[in-house]
Image (cartoon, helix red, strand yellow):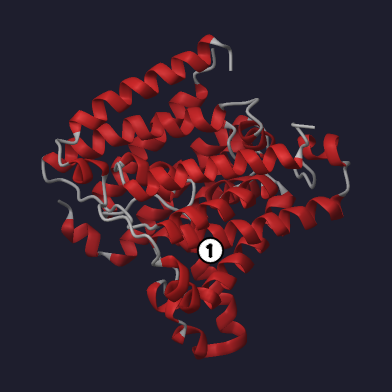
Amino acid sequence: MDWTPYLAGAGIGILSWIAFLLSNKPLGCSTAFTRTSGMIERIFRGKKTDEKPYYQKFAPVVDWEWMLVAGVFLGAFAASLLVGGFAFEWVPTLFGETFGYDTGLRLAVALVGGILMGLGSRWAGGCTSGHGISGTLQLAISSWIAVVVFFVSGIVTAFLLYGVLW
Amino acid sequence: MFEHLHENNRLQLLIGFLIGCCFGGLLSISGVTEYNVILGQLLLTDFTVIKVMLAAVVVGMIGIYAMKERGMVELHPKPGSIGTTVIGGIIFGMGFAILGYCPGTVAGAVGHGSLDALFGGVTGILIGAGIFAAAYPTLNEKILSKGPFHSMTIPDYLRINPWYIIIPLCILIGGFLTGLEYFGL
Protein backbone atom coordinates (compact mmCIF):
# COMPACT_ATOMS: atom_id res chain seq x y z
CA MET A 1 0.00 0.00 0.00
CA ASP A 2 0.98 3.63 -0.52
CA TRP A 3 1.54 5.56 2.70
CA THR A 4 1.96 8.96 0.99
CA PRO A 5 -1.66 10.20 1.44
CA TYR A 6 -1.61 9.25 5.14
CA LEU A 7 1.78 10.85 5.82
CA ALA A 8 0.80 14.03 3.94
CA GLY A 9 -2.54 14.09 5.80
CA ALA A 10 -0.81 13.62 9.17
CA GLY A 11 1.55 16.46 8.22
CA ILE A 12 -1.46 18.70 7.50
CA GLY A 13 -2.89 17.72 10.90
CA ILE A 14 0.38 18.82 12.55
CA LEU A 15 0.31 22.07 10.53
CA SER A 16 -3.12 22.76 11.98
CA TRP A 17 -1.64 22.40 15.51
CA ILE A 18 1.02 24.93 14.55
CA ALA A 19 -1.54 27.33 13.06
CA PHE A 20 -3.71 27.19 16.20
CA LEU A 21 -0.70 27.60 18.48
CA LEU A 22 1.31 30.28 16.73
CA SER A 23 -1.49 32.19 14.98
CA ASN A 24 -4.69 31.27 16.86
CA LYS A 25 -6.24 30.41 13.49
CA PRO A 26 -7.59 27.34 11.71
CA LEU A 27 -6.27 26.52 8.22
CA GLY A 28 -8.65 27.84 5.56
CA CYS A 29 -8.44 29.17 2.03
CA SER A 30 -11.68 30.61 0.64
CA THR A 31 -11.78 34.03 2.38
CA ALA A 32 -8.53 34.89 0.57
CA PHE A 33 -10.54 34.83 -2.66
CA THR A 34 -13.20 37.14 -1.19
CA ARG A 35 -10.50 39.60 -0.15
CA THR A 36 -8.81 39.44 -3.55
CA SER A 37 -12.14 39.90 -5.29
CA GLY A 38 -12.65 43.02 -3.16
CA MET A 39 -9.17 44.30 -4.02
CA ILE A 40 -9.94 43.94 -7.75
CA GLU A 41 -13.34 45.61 -7.33
CA ARG A 42 -11.65 48.48 -5.52
CA ILE A 43 -9.57 49.22 -8.64
CA PHE A 44 -12.81 49.91 -10.54
CA ARG A 45 -15.14 51.24 -7.86
CA GLY A 46 -12.69 52.78 -5.40
CA LYS A 47 -13.67 53.31 -1.78
CA LYS A 48 -17.32 52.40 -2.42
CA THR A 49 -16.22 48.76 -2.40
CA ASP A 50 -15.40 48.96 1.30
CA GLU A 51 -18.99 49.96 2.08
CA LYS A 52 -20.34 46.57 1.00
CA PRO A 53 -21.41 44.73 4.17
CA TYR A 54 -19.53 41.57 3.17
CA TYR A 55 -16.27 43.49 2.69
CA GLN A 56 -16.76 45.00 6.12
CA LYS A 57 -16.71 41.47 7.50
CA PHE A 58 -13.80 40.44 5.26
CA ALA A 59 -11.88 43.59 4.40
CA PRO A 60 -10.11 43.55 1.01
CA VAL A 61 -6.61 43.40 2.49
CA VAL A 62 -3.74 40.93 2.57
CA ASP A 63 -4.19 39.00 5.81
CA TRP A 64 -2.90 35.76 7.36
CA GLU A 65 -5.12 33.51 5.25
CA TRP A 66 -4.23 35.38 2.05
CA MET A 67 -0.56 34.74 2.78
CA LEU A 68 -1.42 31.09 3.50
CA VAL A 69 -2.92 30.69 0.01
CA ALA A 70 0.09 32.47 -1.54
CA GLY A 71 2.24 29.97 0.38
CA VAL A 72 0.20 27.03 -0.96
CA PHE A 73 1.00 28.21 -4.49
CA LEU A 74 4.72 28.54 -3.78
CA GLY A 75 4.92 25.34 -1.74
CA ALA A 76 3.24 23.30 -4.48
CA PHE A 77 5.50 24.93 -7.09
CA ALA A 78 8.64 24.10 -5.07
CA ALA A 79 7.47 20.54 -4.32
CA SER A 80 6.66 19.87 -7.98
CA LEU A 81 10.13 21.03 -8.99
CA LEU A 82 11.91 19.04 -6.26
CA VAL A 83 9.89 15.84 -6.44
CA GLY A 84 8.90 16.13 -10.09
CA GLY A 85 5.51 16.70 -11.60
CA PHE A 86 5.76 20.31 -12.73
CA ALA A 87 4.22 20.62 -16.19
CA PHE A 88 2.23 23.27 -17.99
CA GLU A 89 -1.11 21.71 -18.79
CA TRP A 90 -4.30 23.18 -20.27
CA VAL A 91 -6.50 20.10 -20.18
CA PRO A 92 -6.22 17.41 -17.47
CA THR A 93 -6.00 13.89 -18.97
CA LEU A 94 -9.24 12.54 -17.42
CA PHE A 95 -11.15 15.50 -18.85
CA GLY A 96 -9.36 15.28 -22.21
CA GLU A 97 -9.99 11.55 -22.67
CA THR A 98 -13.70 11.99 -21.96
CA PHE A 99 -14.58 15.34 -23.53
CA GLY A 100 -11.65 15.89 -25.91
CA TYR A 101 -8.49 17.94 -25.55
CA ASP A 102 -10.19 21.25 -26.37
CA THR A 103 -8.59 24.08 -24.38
CA GLY A 104 -11.52 26.44 -24.91
CA LEU A 105 -14.03 23.87 -23.67
CA ARG A 106 -11.95 23.04 -20.59
CA LEU A 107 -11.47 26.72 -19.72
CA ALA A 108 -15.20 27.43 -20.11
CA VAL A 109 -16.10 24.45 -17.92
CA ALA A 110 -13.46 25.40 -15.33
CA LEU A 111 -14.75 28.98 -15.28
CA VAL A 112 -18.34 27.84 -14.64
CA GLY A 113 -17.12 25.41 -11.97
CA GLY A 114 -14.97 28.13 -10.43
CA ILE A 115 -17.89 30.55 -10.20
CA LEU A 116 -19.99 27.91 -8.44
CA MET A 117 -17.03 27.07 -6.19
CA GLY A 118 -16.44 30.73 -5.25
CA LEU A 119 -20.13 31.30 -4.62
CA GLY A 120 -20.66 28.02 -2.76
CA SER A 121 -17.60 28.22 -0.54
CA ARG A 122 -18.50 31.69 0.71
CA TRP A 123 -22.18 30.75 0.97
CA ALA A 124 -21.32 27.72 3.10
CA GLY A 125 -18.78 29.77 5.09
CA GLY A 126 -15.81 27.57 4.27
CA CYS A 127 -14.20 25.14 1.84
CA THR A 128 -12.55 21.73 1.85
CA SER A 129 -9.84 23.06 4.18
CA GLY A 130 -11.82 25.47 6.41
CA HIS A 131 -14.79 23.13 6.87
CA GLY A 132 -13.43 19.83 5.55
CA ILE A 133 -10.28 19.66 7.66
CA SER A 134 -10.15 22.49 10.25
CA GLY A 135 -13.84 22.49 11.14
CA THR A 136 -14.26 18.72 11.31
CA LEU A 137 -11.16 18.30 13.48
CA GLN A 138 -12.72 20.76 15.96
CA LEU A 139 -15.89 18.61 15.82
CA ALA A 140 -17.89 21.62 14.58
CA ILE A 141 -21.46 20.63 13.70
CA SER A 142 -21.64 23.04 10.73
CA SER A 143 -18.42 21.60 9.27
CA TRP A 144 -19.43 17.93 9.50
CA ILE A 145 -22.72 18.76 7.77
CA ALA A 146 -20.89 20.91 5.20
CA VAL A 147 -18.32 18.26 4.29
CA VAL A 148 -20.96 15.56 3.86
CA VAL A 149 -23.02 17.88 1.62
CA PHE A 150 -19.89 18.90 -0.36
CA PHE A 151 -19.08 15.28 -1.19
CA VAL A 152 -22.65 14.08 -1.81
CA SER A 153 -23.28 17.01 -4.15
CA GLY A 154 -19.84 16.60 -5.74
CA ILE A 155 -20.29 12.85 -6.29
CA VAL A 156 -23.77 13.30 -7.82
CA THR A 157 -22.50 16.08 -10.13
CA ALA A 158 -19.40 14.08 -11.15
CA PHE A 159 -21.52 10.98 -11.93
CA LEU A 160 -23.90 13.08 -14.06
CA LEU A 161 -21.02 14.87 -15.80
CA TYR A 162 -19.11 11.70 -16.64
CA GLY A 163 -22.30 9.79 -17.41
CA VAL A 164 -21.45 6.98 -15.02
CA LEU A 165 -25.05 5.92 -14.53
CA TRP A 166 -26.10 5.70 -18.17
CA MET B 1 -0.12 31.00 24.89
CA PHE B 2 1.92 33.08 22.48
CA GLU B 3 -0.44 36.09 22.79
CA HIS B 4 2.38 38.50 21.97
CA LEU B 5 3.08 36.53 18.84
CA HIS B 6 -0.64 36.59 17.88
CA GLU B 7 -0.63 40.39 18.08
CA ASN B 8 2.46 40.85 15.91
CA ASN B 9 0.68 41.38 12.60
CA ARG B 10 3.69 41.47 10.31
CA LEU B 11 5.20 38.37 11.83
CA GLN B 12 1.78 36.67 11.51
CA LEU B 13 1.80 37.30 7.77
CA LEU B 14 5.18 35.56 7.56
CA ILE B 15 3.97 32.65 9.71
CA GLY B 16 0.85 32.31 7.54
CA PHE B 17 3.02 32.26 4.43
CA LEU B 18 5.41 29.63 5.84
CA ILE B 19 2.55 27.39 7.02
CA GLY B 20 1.01 27.84 3.57
CA CYS B 21 4.24 26.73 1.87
CA CYS B 22 4.27 23.51 3.91
CA PHE B 23 0.53 23.02 3.30
CA GLY B 24 1.03 23.47 -0.47
CA GLY B 25 4.00 21.12 -0.50
CA LEU B 26 2.04 18.40 1.32
CA LEU B 27 -1.05 18.85 -0.88
CA SER B 28 1.08 18.63 -4.00
CA ILE B 29 3.11 15.58 -2.89
CA SER B 30 -0.08 13.72 -1.89
CA GLY B 31 -1.50 14.31 -5.37
CA VAL B 32 -4.71 16.10 -4.33
CA THR B 33 -3.84 19.24 -6.30
CA GLU B 34 -4.48 17.25 -9.50
CA TYR B 35 -7.81 17.36 -11.32
CA ASN B 36 -7.56 13.62 -12.07
CA VAL B 37 -7.22 12.77 -8.36
CA ILE B 38 -10.10 15.02 -7.24
CA LEU B 39 -12.43 13.76 -9.99
CA GLY B 40 -11.23 10.22 -9.22
CA GLN B 41 -12.45 10.75 -5.67
CA LEU B 42 -15.84 12.12 -6.75
CA LEU B 43 -16.22 9.25 -9.26
CA LEU B 44 -15.25 6.87 -6.42
CA THR B 45 -12.30 5.35 -8.28
CA ASP B 46 -9.44 6.99 -6.32
CA PHE B 47 -9.71 7.57 -2.56
CA THR B 48 -6.60 9.74 -2.09
CA VAL B 49 -8.57 12.88 -1.16
CA ILE B 50 -10.49 11.11 1.61
CA LYS B 51 -7.31 9.44 2.91
CA VAL B 52 -5.47 12.78 3.17
CA MET B 53 -8.44 14.52 4.79
CA LEU B 54 -9.19 11.79 7.33
CA ALA B 55 -5.52 11.42 8.33
CA ALA B 56 -5.37 15.21 8.85
CA VAL B 57 -8.58 15.14 10.90
CA VAL B 58 -7.41 12.30 13.19
CA VAL B 59 -3.98 13.82 13.88
CA GLY B 60 -5.32 17.37 14.06
CA MET B 61 -8.26 16.53 16.31
CA ILE B 62 -6.24 14.63 18.91
CA GLY B 63 -3.59 17.37 19.08
CA ILE B 64 -5.98 20.32 19.12
CA TYR B 65 -8.22 18.84 21.83
CA ALA B 66 -5.19 17.78 23.92
CA MET B 67 -3.81 21.32 23.69
CA LYS B 68 -7.21 22.86 24.37
CA GLU B 69 -7.52 20.91 27.64
CA ARG B 70 -4.20 22.40 28.71
CA GLY B 71 -5.32 25.93 27.81
CA MET B 72 -2.80 26.20 24.98
CA VAL B 73 -5.25 26.83 22.13
CA GLU B 74 -8.80 28.09 21.63
CA LEU B 75 -11.32 26.47 19.29
CA HIS B 76 -12.81 28.44 16.40
CA PRO B 77 -15.82 26.44 15.20
CA LYS B 78 -17.99 28.20 12.63
CA PRO B 79 -21.71 28.74 13.16
CA GLY B 80 -24.03 27.30 10.52
CA SER B 81 -27.61 26.90 9.42
CA ILE B 82 -29.59 24.91 6.87
CA GLY B 83 -29.69 28.02 4.63
CA THR B 84 -25.94 28.53 4.88
CA THR B 85 -24.36 25.12 5.23
CA VAL B 86 -26.68 22.90 3.20
CA ILE B 87 -27.53 25.25 0.31
CA GLY B 88 -23.97 26.61 0.13
CA GLY B 89 -22.63 23.06 0.36
CA ILE B 90 -24.76 21.88 -2.59
CA ILE B 91 -23.46 24.76 -4.76
CA PHE B 92 -19.91 24.04 -3.56
CA GLY B 93 -20.20 20.36 -4.48
CA MET B 94 -21.37 21.20 -8.00
CA GLY B 95 -18.42 23.56 -8.39
CA PHE B 96 -16.08 20.93 -6.92
CA ALA B 97 -17.03 18.37 -9.61
CA ILE B 98 -17.20 20.82 -12.54
CA LEU B 99 -13.97 22.66 -11.73
CA GLY B 100 -12.09 19.72 -10.25
CA TYR B 101 -10.25 21.84 -7.69
CA CYS B 102 -11.20 23.60 -4.44
CA PRO B 103 -9.95 27.00 -3.21
CA GLY B 104 -6.82 25.56 -1.59
CA THR B 105 -5.94 22.92 -4.18
CA VAL B 106 -6.53 25.37 -7.06
CA ALA B 107 -3.62 27.48 -5.74
CA GLY B 108 -1.49 24.34 -5.52
CA ALA B 109 -2.53 23.26 -9.03
CA VAL B 110 -1.48 26.65 -10.41
CA GLY B 111 1.85 26.08 -8.61
CA HIS B 112 2.56 22.89 -10.55
CA GLY B 113 1.57 24.39 -13.87
CA SER B 114 -2.15 23.67 -14.37
CA LEU B 115 -3.27 26.52 -16.61
CA ASP B 116 -6.97 25.53 -16.44
CA ALA B 117 -6.71 26.05 -12.67
CA LEU B 118 -5.26 29.53 -13.21
CA PHE B 119 -7.31 30.93 -16.09
CA GLY B 120 -10.55 29.02 -15.46
CA GLY B 121 -10.44 28.13 -11.76
CA VAL B 122 -8.93 31.14 -10.01
CA THR B 123 -10.78 33.59 -12.27
CA GLY B 124 -14.07 31.78 -11.68
CA ILE B 125 -13.63 31.57 -7.90
CA LEU B 126 -12.87 35.31 -7.76
CA ILE B 127 -16.02 36.05 -9.79
CA GLY B 128 -18.10 33.68 -7.63
CA ALA B 129 -16.77 35.24 -4.41
CA GLY B 130 -17.56 38.70 -5.85
CA ILE B 131 -21.12 37.63 -6.72
CA PHE B 132 -21.57 36.35 -3.17
CA ALA B 133 -20.29 39.63 -1.70
CA ALA B 134 -22.74 41.57 -3.91
CA ALA B 135 -25.68 39.30 -3.03
CA TYR B 136 -24.77 38.97 0.66
CA PRO B 137 -27.20 41.56 2.13
CA THR B 138 -30.19 39.96 0.36
CA LEU B 139 -29.07 36.38 0.94
CA ASN B 140 -28.34 37.10 4.59
CA GLU B 141 -31.84 38.40 5.13
CA LYS B 142 -33.72 35.76 3.17
CA ILE B 143 -31.76 32.51 3.19
CA LEU B 144 -28.62 32.37 5.32
CA SER B 145 -30.40 32.73 8.65
CA LYS B 146 -32.90 29.91 7.97
CA GLY B 147 -32.67 26.91 10.28
CA PRO B 148 -29.69 27.87 12.46
CA PHE B 149 -27.75 25.14 14.28
CA HIS B 150 -27.98 25.87 17.99
CA SER B 151 -24.69 24.33 19.08
CA MET B 152 -21.21 24.91 17.77
CA THR B 153 -19.60 21.52 18.35
CA ILE B 154 -20.78 17.92 18.69
CA PRO B 155 -19.56 17.60 22.33
CA ASP B 156 -21.41 20.85 23.21
CA TYR B 157 -24.57 19.52 21.62
CA LEU B 158 -24.39 16.17 23.41
CA ARG B 159 -23.00 17.77 26.58
CA ILE B 160 -20.34 15.12 26.99
CA ASN B 161 -16.58 15.00 27.36
CA PRO B 162 -15.10 15.45 23.85
CA TRP B 163 -12.93 12.33 24.21
CA TYR B 164 -16.11 10.20 24.19
CA ILE B 165 -16.50 11.42 20.59
CA ILE B 166 -12.84 11.63 19.58
CA ILE B 167 -11.80 8.09 20.53
CA PRO B 168 -14.73 6.26 18.87
CA LEU B 169 -14.45 8.57 15.82
CA CYS B 170 -10.73 7.76 15.44
CA ILE B 171 -11.51 4.03 15.69
CA LEU B 172 -14.27 4.42 13.08
CA ILE B 173 -11.98 6.35 10.71
CA GLY B 174 -9.17 3.82 11.28
CA GLY B 175 -11.58 0.99 10.45
CA PHE B 176 -12.86 2.77 7.33
CA LEU B 177 -9.32 3.42 6.04
CA THR B 178 -8.27 -0.17 6.80
CA GLY B 179 -11.31 -1.29 4.80
CA LEU B 180 -10.32 0.91 1.85
CA GLU B 181 -6.82 -0.57 1.85
CA TYR B 182 -8.16 -4.11 2.29
CA PHE B 183 -10.27 -3.71 -0.86
CA GLY B 184 -7.31 -2.11 -2.65
CA LEU B 185 -9.00 1.28 -3.11
Q: Residue at x 44, y 73 (%)?
A: B140
Question: What chain letter is assigned to the residue under label 1?
Answer: A
Q: State left or right for residue A31 relative to residue A151.
A: left
Q: Is residue B1 above or below residue A37?
A: above
Give the class, few, some or many, for how many residues have Cα within 10 Å of label 1's Cα (few <14, many ≥20).
Answer: many
In the picture, which quadrant includes the C terminus of chain B?
top right
Q: Is residue A126 left or right of residue B126?
A: left
Q: Residue at x 12, y 40 (%)?
A: B69
Quadrant position of residue B168: top left
Residue at the image position 15 percent from the left and 45 percent from the top: B72
Q: Which residue is mark 1?
A: A33
Q: Give the side of residue B61 with respect to residue A76, left or right.
A: left
**Tag 1: residue type?**
Phe
Q: Position of residue B41 (x, y in %)?
A: 61, 32
Residue A111: where, in percent of width, then height?
72, 59
Q: Residue furthest top?
A: B182
Decide which of A24, B15 is in the foreground and name it.
A24
Q: Is residue A25 left or right of residue B19?
A: left
Q: Who is closer to the viewer here, B146 or B3?
A: B146
Query: Is residue A28 in sight in this rendering?
Result: yes
State the image coordinates of residue B103 (x, y, percent, origin top left): 55, 53
- Numbered-mark total: 1
Looking at the image, which residue sits at the far front?
Answer: B147
Q: Residue at x 61, y 61 (%)?
A: B125
* Position of A38 relative to A49 (above/below): above
In this picture, is A32 found above or below A78? below
As drawn, which residue projects farthest toward the left?
B70
Kindly tell me whether residue A125 is visible in this rendering.
no
SS assignment at label 1: helix
